[in-house]
Structure formats: C-alpha cells, structure tokens
C-alpha cells in the first residue's frame, strides 16, 4: 500500500514541477513559495474539520518546529530553482535526495541501505552525470557536475534535495505523532505563516500578487497538498529512504514533461541518463 501512495505522491510532484515552472514566470519566488504552502493548507482545512483533530503525541511539536524551518527554506529555493533553470537541468539534482535521506536514516532510524541499495545510489549518481552531459562536456569531462557551482538554479535545487532529506524524516515523526492528513495541514499552514512574513518584507504585495495569479496558486496548492497527504500516508507505512526513492521517480516524468512543454533539448545520452536515474530509484526500492 505504501508503494502505491508513494507513486501518487511522485505523480503529484511531477505536476507540481510543471505548474511551479509556469507560475515562476508570473511572479517572484517568495510569493510563489508562500502561495504553494498557503493554498495547500486552505484546501486541506475542510478535510481536517470533517475528520477532526487526531490524538497529538509529544513528538509532534518538536518535529513541527523542524518542519517549519525546512518547509520555508526549501519552498523558496524550489521556486528560485524553477525560475532560473530549465526543468531538465535542475530537476535531476533531486536524484541526490534518496542518497541524502539514506545517510540521514543512520541518525533517525539507526540503519543504512544494503549492497543493493548502494548499487541503486551508484546508478543515480551516474544517471545524474549523463543527464547533464550535453554540449557543456566540451568544457571538461567533469564540468557537468563541477559546473553546478556556476548555475544558481541548479545549485538551489540540489539544496532542496538536501533539505528534503531531513524533512522526510521529520515528516515521518510528525505523521506518526498525529496523522497523515494533520501532518500535511499543519506543516503547510505553519510553513505558509513564516513564508508570508518573508514575502511581505521582500515584496510588500503578497496577497495581491497571490490573488492576481490565483489559478496557478490554487492549482499549485491543491497538487502540493495532495502530494504531502499521500507522502505522509506512505511514510507512516514504509521505510523512509524507500518511500523517498519512489517519490523521486518524479524526476524522470518531470524532465520528460519539461522537454515536451518547454521545448527543452534532449540528446540520446541525456535520455539514457534519465532512464538510469529511474533504474537507480527502482533498485533502491527493491
């Protein structure tokens, strides 16, 4: 069951990349980040009212505090990355997310992946390299990886993957201390409050811009809310690195969608790299 829920979250994540990319052309990253979290909480609120507040365990509050920090951080970096870089270049950086999550599981779950798991991680790393080999390889064999430092959008998405790896473990703690629905609602609401303050001091026009582009904001919020709900439900049933590995299969779908919708260039080697990324994700699950 957790596998099915994780795939639902993956498909939601793919759609979120595309809508987030479209939204990034209409407004700045601070308002986009706020809108995504705020409208997600608004959409989830009626369901919380209908089902009622679950039993809240003591671990809920410290994990929520951690989620406030991680959610506000990755939301801004995520919106910035989508604004600055093509999907096919920035999104593959999230393939590092299962690697980071597996490493952090040593601290949160007291265990690491086995040999098969590290094989999957190797496939992902090679896939990332191949997916970034286009004409930039003429600048040096390792430029596709080393060149990240010259690409703010790609670097921002790599930071998102790192923050998500910590947030995934905090999300599981929060879910087990409440419920998947209440986790999704509380984390998006708390995150939106912090993001509102940041966006207000940066732009002074938070709500007017969010309302002006309400179609993107509502769509992004609905998809993000559904993705967080299914992600929390999957985390409550499965091992965190494995759940994250399946969810990151959205990398393949998003990169391919980016190529179709935004006319981004794909070479055969880049397509092979993206397929290898997906294979690595599958191996991690196995």
Image (tube, grey):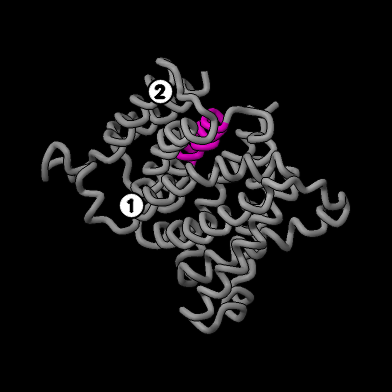
What stretch of residues is rendered in magenta?
Answer: 240-253
- Residue 28, above or below 61: below
Q: Residues within 10 Å of mark 1 (few under 14, many from 20)?
A: many
Residue 123: % across, % down: 35, 25
Magenta-drawn stretch contains 283: no
- Residue 44 vs residue 271, the one in the foreground: 44
- Asked whether, in this view, residue 147 is left or right of residue 193, the answer is left
Residue sitting farthest toward the bottom: 204
Residue 216 in sight here: no
- Residue 2, above or below 29: above
Q: Which mark is residue 154?
A: 1
To which quarter of the image does residue 252 belong? top left
Magenta-drawn stretch contains 248: yes
Q: Which residue is mark 2?
A: 120
- Residue 81, above or below 204: above
**Which residue occupies 57% across, 53% down?**
67
Residue sitting farthest toward the front: 58
* Mark earlier in primary sequence (1, 2): 2
The residue tagged with tag 1: helix, strand or loop? helix
- Residue 207 vs residue 243, the one in the foreground: 243
**Which residue occupies 52% across, 84% down?**
204
């Amino acid at each position: 069951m957790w596998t099915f829920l994780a795939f639902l979250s993956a498909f939601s994540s793919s759609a979120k990349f595309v809508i987030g990319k479209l939204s990034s052309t209409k407004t700045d990253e601070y308002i986009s980040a706020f809108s995504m979290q705020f409208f997600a909480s608004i959409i989830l609120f009626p369901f919380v009212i209908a089902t009622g507040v679950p039993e809240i365990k003591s671990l809920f509050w410290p994990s929520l505090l951690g989620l406030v920090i991680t959610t506000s951080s990755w939301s801004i970096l995520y919106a910035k990355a989508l604004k600055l870089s093509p999907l096919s270049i920035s999104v593959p950086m999230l393939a590092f997310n299962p690697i980071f999550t597996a490493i952090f599981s040593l601290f949160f779950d007291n265990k690491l992946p086995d040999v098969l798991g590290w094989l999957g991680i190797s496939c992902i790393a090679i896939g990332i390299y191949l997916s970034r080999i286009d004409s930039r390889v003429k600048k040096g064999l390792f430029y596709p990886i080393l060149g990240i430092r010259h690409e703010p959008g790609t670097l921002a998405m790599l930071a998102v993957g790192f923050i998500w790896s910590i947030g995934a473990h905090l999300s599981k703690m929060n879910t087990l201390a409440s419920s998947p629905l209440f986790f999704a609602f509380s984390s998006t609401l708390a995150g939106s409050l912090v993001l509102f303050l940041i966006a207000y001091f940066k732009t002074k026009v938070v709500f007017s811009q969010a309302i002006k582009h309400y179609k993107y904001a509502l769509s992004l919020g609905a998809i993000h809310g559904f993705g967080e709900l299914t992600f929390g439900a999957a985390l409550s049933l499965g091992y965190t690195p494995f759940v994250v590995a399946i969810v990151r299969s959205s990398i393949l779908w998003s990169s391919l969608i980016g190529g179709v919708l935004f006319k981004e260039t794909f070479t055969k080697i880049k397509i092979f790299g993206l397929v290898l990324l997906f294979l690595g994700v599958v191996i991690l699950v196995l």
